[in-house]
Amino acid sequence: MRVIAVANQKGGVGKTTTAINLGTALAAVGRRVLVMDCDAQGNASTGLGVEPVARRKTSYDVLVGEGTLSEAIIGTKVPNLDLVPGDENLAGVETLLHDDPKKNFRLREAFKQFSRAGRDYDTVLIDCPPSLSTVTINAMVAADAVLVPLQCEFLALEGLSQLLRTVDLVRSALNPDLEIQGVVLTMYDKRNNLSDQVAGEVRSFFGAKVYQTVIPRNVKLSEAPSFGLPAILYDHKCSGSEAYIMLAQELMQRERERAAA
């Protein structure tokens, strides 16, 4: 089971869109995928068609010990793709776990119990909140790697250094095996020179860590969640869907190369 935290403390960069569409593309080729919604807004849950009334156990319950991972998992409209939903209670995790010395390890322990019970997935994608909070730290401690969606705008570069410092901190103090799985350039607008400039700067800094696949600005990606569908099911021929299918192929190739190394 490969656990990947989809993280960036900046909001609106495409974390949730990446989690649900990358997950859907992986599931479409037969991978068993779990998307874990750790954002209090619950957008990944909504985007996968799971209404609030159906979220009886959530990632909040898993984090605070009021439910197991197995109890929180529900199916979705996407074959091979399951979900741990999120809800507004996640906003209170920071306060509730403030004095717990093991607060950063709760999600890791939940995954360990899950594996000991004989449950497994090929890929777990954790949709992190847009903050460097206890929830995000839990995701990074539980994860094997971090996938960073990065919007092709200048201000996105400023926030990236903070995220990298957090990854380094988690690696040095909590999870020494954590790695940057890759950086995905999102909301790319080929008509805008700034997109090319940002992409160039990111590639010069991260090199091969940056995916060749670039996610374009695409209205279908924005529309799909309102129908409770990943864009790949909403309109699999749109440019956004095609990009996420290519991203999934590139991710699988990277994972094969990593396993062979």
Image (cartoon, rainbow, N blue to C red):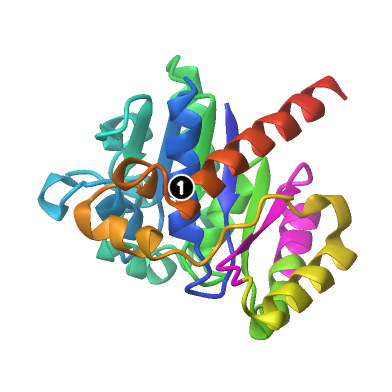
Q: Judge whether 260 appears above or below 100 on screen.
A: above
Q: Which residue is mark 1?
A: 241
- In front of the other: 243 or 248: 243
> Mark 1, residues whose alpha carbon is within 10 Å: few (<14), some, or many (≥20)?
many
- Quarter of the rendering occupied by the C terminus: top right
Q: Is residue 87 left or right of residue 177?
A: left
Question: Quick one: which residue is furthest to the left in this view?
Answer: 53
The residue at 28%/57% (across/down) is: 225
The residue at 39%/64% (across/down) is: 93
Q: Is residue 213 left or right of residue 69?
A: right
Q: Judge whether 97 appears above or below 58 on screen.
A: below
Q: In this view of the protein, can residue 39 be seen by the observer?
A: no
The residue at 33%/53% (across/down) is: 60
Q: Is residue 89 left or right of residue 147?
A: left
The image quarter in which residue 219 lies: bottom left
Whether 195 is among the magenta residues is no
Whether 187 is among the magenta residues is yes
Magenta span covers which residues?
165-189
Q: Position of residue 10 (x, y in %)?
A: 56, 75
Q: How many marks do you count on the picture?
A: 1
Element type where label 1 sits in the image? helix
Q: In this view of the protein, can residue 92 be seen by the observer?
A: yes
